[in-house]
Amino acid sequence: MPDAGRFATLLKQARLRVTPQRLAILRALATGKHVATCQAIWARARRATGGLGQMTTYRILERLHAAGLIEQFDLGGVAHFGLADRHHDHVICQRCGSVEPTETCLLGPHGDLTARLRRSGFVVKHHRLDLYGVCRACRAGT
């Protein structure tokens, strides 16, 4: 798999051991929707490893999140995870729970808020912006 080398490099850079289980979980995140629950990730990764436990999956997700390799979202009290492979902001539907990355960074280095902060002497190193609302499909269904 082409991502295996990239994921192994990311794990090493984060000072985490490269294991088949961690690689399978990262591949499961890369091949599914933008975000997924622990249960969905476990189901995909288990097929690849032949015997990955659900608690092991959750512990690995916690370590990957702590290392900054994945993002975690709380959608209706249920944790969802996604790769943190590049910066993007998110729009999150409060009805169906869909999470979609935005095409561009909404704040960006040239955004109004970033410019104001820079003028005040504050330099933004990174951010995460999640916008909550109702998606087009849910609005059409009402």
Image (cartoon, helix red, strand yellow):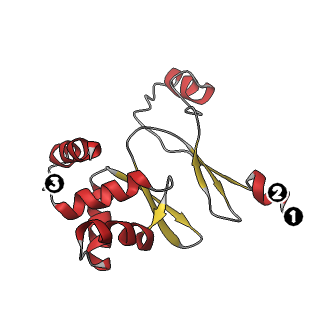
Taking the spot 36% from the left edge, 71% from the top edge, the residue there is 42
Nearer to me, 121 or 45:
45
Q: Locate residue 45 relative to residue 94 in the image: left or right.
A: left
Taking the spot 41% from the left edge, 38% from the top edge, the residue there is 86
Q: CA distance from mark 1 to mark 3?
A: 47 Å
Q: Position of residue 71 (x, y in %)?
A: 41, 54
- In the rendered image, which residue does mark 1 sit on? 142
Q: Locate residue 112 relative to residue 22 in the image: left or right.
A: right
Taking the spot 23% from the left edge, 44% from the top edge, the residue there is 10
Nearer to me, 118 or 2:
2
| Amino acid type, label 1 | Thr
Q: Which mark is residue 70?
A: none
Helix or strand or loop: what does disc 1 sit on?
loop
| Amino acid type, label 2 | Arg
The mark nearer the N terminus, 1 or 3, is 3
The mark nearer the N terminus, 2 or 3, is 3
Place residue 85 in its image quadrant: top left
Helix or strand or loop: what does disc 2 sit on?
helix
Q: CA distance from mark 2 to mark 1?
A: 5 Å
Farthest residue to the right: give it. Answer: 142
| Amino acid type, label 3 | Leu
Taking the spot 31% from the left edge, 70% from the top edge, the residue there is 47
Q: CA distance from mark 2 to mark 3?
A: 43 Å
- In the rendered image, which residue does mark 3 sit on? 16
Helix or strand or loop: what does disc 3 sit on?
loop
**Front label number (2 vs 3):** 2
- In the rendered image, which residue does mark 2 sit on? 139
